[in-house]
Amino acid sequence: MAPEEISWLRRGACRSSDPDLFFPLAPTPLQEARAKAVCAACQVAQECRSYALRAGEAEGIWGGLTPEERRRTRFPEGWRRPAAS
């Protein structure tokens, strides 16, 4: 990560939280809700979310999105359509 690309990271609400909240070994709905609540109050959530989508982050809660939510954002249903015949 280039320092200028992640300068927002120092202002993240997650800095004062346990990293395991955002990167659990076995995510649960309660853990995801708690992490998303931190993100909802974060002043840099949009930058965080944009970074995770650009970088293809495969793990953790970033900008209030789970890995599955990021995949759906990057590759919405129907994005892969059969080639025209």
Image: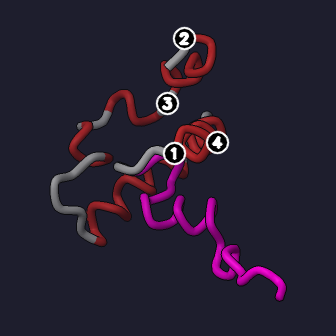
Membership of 77 in magenta stretch: yes
Q: Looking at the image, which residue is at 37% across and 64% down?
A: 33
Label 3 is placed on what type of residue? Answer: Gly
Image height check: is 30 above or below 50? below
Please say which color scheme the image uses.
secondary structure
Question: Is residue 36 shown left or right of residue 43?
Answer: left
User: For residue 12, which numbered disc appears in the image?
Assistant: 3
User: For residue 3, which numbered disc appears in the image?
Assistant: 2
**Residues in magenta?**
61-85
Image height check: is 65 above or below 8? below
Label 4 is placed on what type of residue? Answer: Ser
Image height check: is 47 above or below 2? below
Q: Main secondary structure of the magenta part?
A: loop
Structural distance between the alpha carbons of marks 3 and 1: 19 Å
Q: Are marks 3 and 1 in contact (CB under 8 Å)?
A: no
Q: Which residue is mark 1?
A: 56
**Residue 67 pos. (x, y %):** 43, 58
Which residue is more in the foreground, 82 or 32? 82
Structural distance between the alpha carbons of marks 3 and 2: 15 Å
Q: Which comes sooner in the sequence, label 3 or label 1?
A: 3
User: For residue 50, which numbered disc appears in the image?
Assistant: 4
Q: Looking at the image, which residue is at 28% across and 68% down?
A: 30
Structural distance between the alpha carbons of marks 1 and 4: 10 Å
Q: Which comes sooner in the sequence, label 1 or label 2?
A: 2
**Residue 14 pos. (x, y %):** 40, 35
